[in-house]
Image: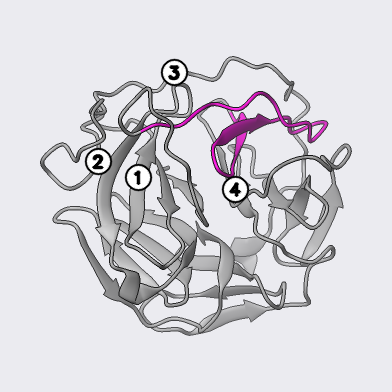
Amino acid sequence: MRWLVLAMVCGACGRLGFDPVTRTGDAAVDGTPDGDGAGSDAPAGATKYYLISGNGAAPAELLEVDLVTGQLVLVGNIPPSFGTMIGLAYWDANTLYASGTTFVKITLSPFTVAAETGPVSDFSALERVGNMLVGISQTTSRITSFTPGSGIAGISVTALTPAVSGGDITQTSDGTWYWYTNTTKQLYTIDLAAATAVPIGSPNPGAPFMTGLVHDDADNLFVVGATLFPIDKVTSLIGTSIDVCLACPTSHPLTSGDTTRSP
């Protein structure tokens, strides 16, 4: 459990209307893969932001997203036989894991998707912590950590309050874990080991359903629903939407997605 002792210091620098740090890279502007099956050819060491979009009735899209411009790059399609994917986690430079109807391992280059051994749970939030993955169940609101490929659980603790409804988790550079749930349409700081959540600011009753939460290199937070939104980590206020597109300027709606980022 020592690896899961987390700082609960809420960043006091968040503010609505921030100017996110621009990510460099040469993401294709036509929405097609760039030839290597691994998304954009960003410079070595550049942060990449991934999301899954799809409801299981058709191939789910694995996409890279530019948090500044909303430009999407198609990395590959996940066959509908795997069902709906609602959780996504970065593992290493060539590996992601996704959860939902099934638990799958995604190899970025060459792009392949395969069923993987893991807990049978619909993790709407999924991220790497140390050498394990941590998921939050959509149906039970319980937090579970496990080793991908073995299915051996490290923890399974008391369910979160409020209940989980979509949303996601992300850990910023100061060690703080943030969680967004549509139950209250609000941001929280969260202690994963204790399964305790502390609300931030006020709910957003008119906000759309959000399925992802991610932070940029300046620790600005973004939530993802049908499109992309900045969210203030001091007030929970949701900012002006950032339209996402594959074949820009045509909008590209997102469905049942989750987000993750490379380190």
Q: Based on the displayed image, in which of its 4 quarters is residue 161 positioned? A: bottom right
Q: Is label 1 in a helix, a strand or a loop?
A: strand
Closer to the N terminus: mark 3 or mark 1? 3
Q: Marks 4 and 1, how far apart in space?
A: 18 Å
Q: Which residue is drawn at 60% across and 46% down?
A: 171
Q: Is 153 in front, or is 101? A: 101
Identity of the amino acid at label 3?
Answer: Thr
Q: Is label 3 in a helix, a strand or a loop?
A: loop
Q: Give the range drawn in magenta.
A: 219-245
Identity of the amino acid at label 2?
Answer: Gly
Identity of the amino acid at label 4?
Answer: Thr
**Residue picked out by circle 2:** 39
Which of label 3 and label 2 is nearer to you?
A: 2
Closer to the N terminus: mark 4 or mark 2? 2
Q: Is label 2 in a helix, a strand or a loop?
A: loop
**Residue picked out by circle 4:** 170
Q: Mark 4 Cα within 10 Å, few/some/many (few <14, many 20+)?
A: many
**Residue picked out by circle 1:** 63
Q: Marks 3 and 1, how far apart in space?
A: 18 Å
Closer to the N terminus: mark 3 or mark 2? 3
Q: Can residue 94 be seen in this view?
A: no
Q: Residue at x 68, y 16 (%)?
A: 17
**Residue picked out by circle 3:** 22
Quadrant of image for the N terminus: bottom right
Quadrant of image for the C terminus: top left
- Residue 87 lies, in percent from the top left, at 50, 62
Mark 3 near mark 1, Cβ–Cβ under 8 Å? no
- Residue 74 lies, in percent from the top left, at 28, 43
Numbered marks: total:
4
